[in-house]
Image (tube, grey):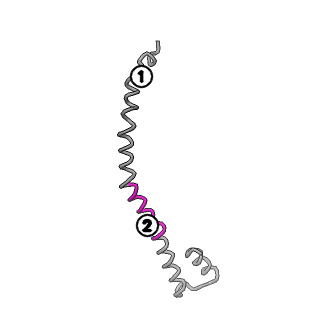
Amino acid sequence: MRAAHCRSLMNLYGQKKKSTAFKFVALLNVATFIIFRLTVSFYLFYWWFTTALGAVVWHLATVSPPILQQIHTYPESQYSTS
């Protein structure tokens, strides 16, 4: 059971917020938030910054020139409105 659910149940059953068990569950709630939310988010941002940005530049460098070449060599007669 998640720590947040434990705290909700402790509140429901009238557990005192000054008790050691309640403080432990609150600390566990903060620790799991840091580990499973913030750490994963920071790692994904790190991965995006180091890997995905380089892939985007590489992708644009290889795909854009052939597309630009096709646009440049496209017959102008098809653009005319007459």
**Marks 2 and 1: CB-CB under 8 Å?**
no
Alpha carbons under labels 2 and 1: distance apart? 50 Å
The residue under label 2 is which amino acid type? Thr
Name the residue located 35 percent from the left edge and 49 percent from the top edge. Answer: 54
Specify whether 58 is left or right of 25: left
Find residue 39 and name its label.
2
Q: Nearer the viewer, residue 14 or 64?
A: 64
Q: Which stretch did the figure color magenta?
A: 35-48
Find residue 74 and name its label.
1
The residue under label 1 is which amino acid type? Tyr
Furthest-top residue in view? 82
Q: How far from the left and from the top, in percent, is residue 40?
A: 45, 64
Q: Nearer the viewer, residue 38 or 47?
A: 47
Quadrant position of residue 69:
top left
Mark toward the viewer: 2 or 1: 1
Image quadrant for the N terminus?
bottom right
